[in-house]
Image (cartoon, coloured by chain):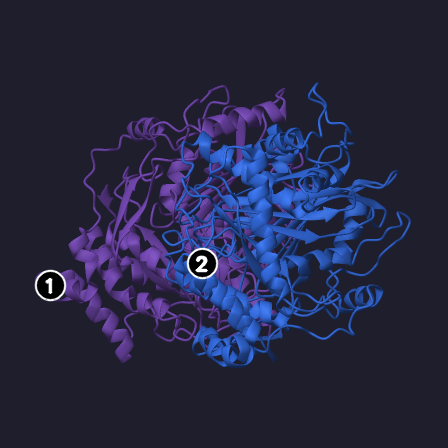
Chain colours: A blue, B purple
């Protein structure tokens, strides 16, 4: 039995039937040539059902005292681990398009995990067209964060199509091997100790004396709230109430799409910025179009929370190692180029601030600046006092083509968490030569989520035009290769 | 907007993520000859997605005041009714046996309904072998009870294989037509008024003065608790703690099986009893075997709650019109014949008591005798003070073969509610010449639920032997016809 860090346990407290707090990942594969699909998937299922020693906490369940999750929370071994429960075989109805896949993932992501068992489910999904199959992995955010989940899936992949992997990605053995492989395990853990985050106000009081940098960051934040502009966006400040700042319902709608890495990076570069700046601008442009179509574009600009990973390189142990920056999406600006530049400036200011801090200081600062959000979420006021309008999160993924027992990995689409006040979440993984976007939204608050995919493409084209990256005939100078094996038609999204 | 009766709202209060309070039904069909499965199911899906005027409360959602569901609860029209959300197309992975079907239904039944929408889901399931398909309908018990759900499905069936039905079973029109068809709508509604059930202690006080019969029933119940045996089993009295009296977890396991109506009735008759007595004895024998195999058979006999429908013939309006009797399952007796006779005596005594009461009195009596259960459930003490050990519920169904747009109805398997202290529920529908059993249990508390099916068959054979209904060679005198189109192999159950 071991105690769950308090910042992990937050996610149990924040959870309700309207707002499940699990993260997910949809991975898409093409079957190897010359295999029988049923027997291949049967073997994959057997690997996943391995019930020997599992990596923590995937063989552990919650244990609480008389106060329930409001008190101390522990992980303890589940003596009756039932892998048939956790590993599930599903199928798509005909015709087995991405539309049917997204529909299934939307449903699976909308239901709560069973708190009397280890907090994860793995779904093996058959019935896709073109010899594809999929896995959807779902785990509670108190057990793992998005980056951790991505590492977990990565541990089963190989760069060699002929490699056979017999280990379950959830096994302790696979975890150790993966850790060694990425030369990890020697780095210091940069997560704050429990005492540091238990009472954020205590931390604030304690830290402000000794830690000059955190004090400076808090002062910067206070300056913005006081009206002196430092270029840094802060949570809650001038965040408009919009169609995205709703109280969520429990149902979700998920869509996924891939874009060429090179294409998005070229846009970032053309504006003197980064790939991530261009990603923000794509999402900003899409949200502007979406809200305009609903006649619901707010006068003030939307703000996005962009989580920043605080993992030391090679740290794959921490369940939650996330800091946050708040970015101005400039959705009030009509001109795509001006919007892009404003976003870049906002990102640069936030990064400049973070660069003055050590990772531990960043997390304490994030804790301080996000603390009010915890209270608004717990009190159900998230929709009335939104801390930000949406979350846009970029997770670094594999840089080479990957295979799982010969099955080609075609896409890694994250499925994250919308919450009260931020009804849609964009999370992307950079996967070899693609950016794999997973967009998850409250089904009721955000109608026509599938249109966001089209709007993102339109926003990207506008930025390419503004940057002179397209010829006058309207074609991009360097046409990117699109693979048939990825979701590419916004029309198929559902 | 209309107020939800308090006895319906109870089911919202009793619900938790460990104990969802919805009822379900799995219906099994064979596709008509010469139809293309995809286009046939497509049409069925279109019918089900009808979003015109729906029968109440299937187009309505919950509305509560500041006290939430602890205060007054109302139904109000859902202005954003989203039929794509409610009607879901699912598929089974290969090889599409009943095992895969039961596995899917187990999962679907274990997740909570979305309280921000009308409280039902309809799943159309493809991918079964032998040209079969299935529907799984799920609705909150505050909206409909098991008998009501059965009527709802019945409204779309015809005795004529060539009949085409264009109406959704959820439509107001289908509901009216069905009501007329069974010559209903003229009967008095026998449900107690809200005031009568709002505070059961008040009812008790009020009624004891004027209603002699209820007073007598309460006296009988008190006699049993005081140790004077009147032959009537009462809730809580000498109910042993057993492997079934557990705190539930959220996951479920569902299995289904059909038996010949004639075969079970013959056993009842041979012992001078009813079909229902024989059903109780089958379940009792199976539970005895199951607990023996777990070395967990309690010394005292298990008790079953048997819901009694209080609907006036033709009343298909009431959401919840249920009384209850408590039956001694005599699981402490080794001899099947003695067990059967004890069960029959217990049933007879309970029925004799109920016969002295009017339906309204029965419901008040049930309210009184079950009231402590409500409190033990709400306080989470159901597993420590079990009111009974299991629920065995017999729902009258169609007496003739039925078709849905030409698709033959092969089975109607109810999926009911296990709860704290009664971790397994047996519900059956008498359907033409079969008894269709649906058995639903907490996945963790009741291991190997599929074995119950085998044990029920063994218990039935033992009763047939004891009654001399089988020849010395071990074959039944009158071999029943079993159809290949129904779940019949316990081995396929999962």
Query: Which percent across, then down, holds residue B463?
Result: 53, 58
Q: Which residue is mark 1?
A: B206
Query: Which percent across, then down, holds residue B171?
Result: 36, 30
| Location of residue A226 with respect to B141 vertically, above or below | below
Secondary structure category for the residue under label 2: helix
> Which one is nearer the viewer's eye here, A477 or B167?
A477
Query: Which percent across, then down, holds residue A114?
Result: 54, 61
Report the mark closest to the observer, 1 or 2.
Answer: 2
> Which quadrant is the N terminus of chain A positioned in?
bottom right
* Measured Cα–Cα span from mark 1 to mark 2: 66 Å
Decide if residue A39 is on the left or right side of residue B404.
right
Q: Which mark is residue A438?
A: none
Q: Which residue is mark 2?
A: A224
Spot the residue most to the left. B210
Query: Which percent across, then down, holds residue B170?
Result: 39, 33
Decide if residue B13 is on the left or right side of residue A416.
left
> Which quadrant is the C terminus of chain A positioned in?
top right
């Amino acid at each position: 039995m071991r105690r769950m860090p308090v910042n992990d346990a937050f996610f149990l407290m924040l959870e309700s039937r309207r707002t499940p707090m699990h993260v997910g990942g949809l991975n898409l594969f093409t079957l190897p040539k010359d295999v029988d699909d049923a027997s291949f998937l049967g073997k994959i299922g057997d690997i996943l059902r391995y019930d020997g020693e599992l990596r923590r906490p995937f063989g552990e369940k919650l244990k609480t005292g008389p106060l329930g999750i409001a008190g101390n929370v522990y992980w303890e071994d589940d003596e009756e681990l039932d892998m048939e429960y956790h590993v599930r075989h599903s199928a798509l109805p005909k015709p087995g398009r991405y539309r049917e896949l997204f529909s299934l993932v939307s449903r699976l992501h909308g239901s709560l995990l069973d708190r009397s068992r280890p907090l994860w489910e793995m779904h093996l999904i058959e019935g896709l067209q073109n010899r594809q199959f999929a896995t959807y992995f779902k785990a509670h955010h108190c057990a793992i964060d998005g980056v951790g989940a991505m590492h977990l899936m990565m541990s089963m992949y190989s760069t060699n199509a002929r490699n056979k992997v017999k280990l379950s990605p959830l096994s302790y053995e696979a975890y150790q091997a993966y850790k060694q492989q990425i030369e990890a395990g020697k780095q210091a853990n940069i997560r704050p100790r429990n005492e540091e985050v238990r009472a954020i106000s205590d931390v604030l009081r304690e830290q402000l004396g000794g830690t000059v940098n955190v004090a400076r960051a808090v002062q910067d934040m206070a300056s913005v709230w006081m009206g002196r502009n430092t270029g840094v966006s802060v949570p809650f400040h001038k965040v408009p109430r919009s169609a995205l700042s709703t109280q969520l319902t429990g149902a979700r709608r998920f869509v996924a799409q891939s874009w060429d890495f090179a294409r998005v990076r070229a846009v970032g570069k053309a504006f003197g910025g980064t790939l991530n700046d261009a990603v923000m601008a794509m999402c900003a442009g899409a949200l502007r179009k979406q809200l305009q179509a609903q006649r619901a574009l707010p006068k003030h600009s939307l703000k996005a929370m962009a989580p920043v990973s605080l993992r030391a390189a090679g740290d794959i142990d921490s369940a939650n190692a996330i800091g946050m920056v708040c970015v101005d999406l400039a959705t009030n600006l009509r001109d795509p180029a001006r919007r892009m530049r404003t976003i870049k400036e906002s990102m640069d200011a936030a990064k400049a601030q973070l660069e003055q801090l050590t990772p531990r200081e960043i997390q304490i600062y994030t804790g301080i600046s996000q603390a009010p959000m915890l209270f608004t979420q717990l009190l159900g006021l998230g929709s009335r006092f939104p801390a930000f309008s949406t979350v846009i999160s970029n997770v670094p993924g594999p840089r080479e083509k990957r295979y799982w027992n010969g099955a080609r990995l075609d896409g890694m689409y994250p499925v994250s968490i919308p919450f009260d006040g931020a009804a849609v979440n964009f999370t992307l993984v950079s996967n070899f030569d693609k950016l794999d976007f997973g967009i998850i939204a409250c089904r009721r608050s955000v109608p026509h989520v599938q249109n966001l995919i089209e709007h993102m493409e339109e926003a990207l084209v506008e930025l390419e035009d503004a940057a002179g990256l397209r010829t006058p005939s309207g074609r991009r100078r360097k046409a990117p290769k699109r693979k048939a094996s990825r979701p590419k038609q916004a029309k198929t999204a559902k």
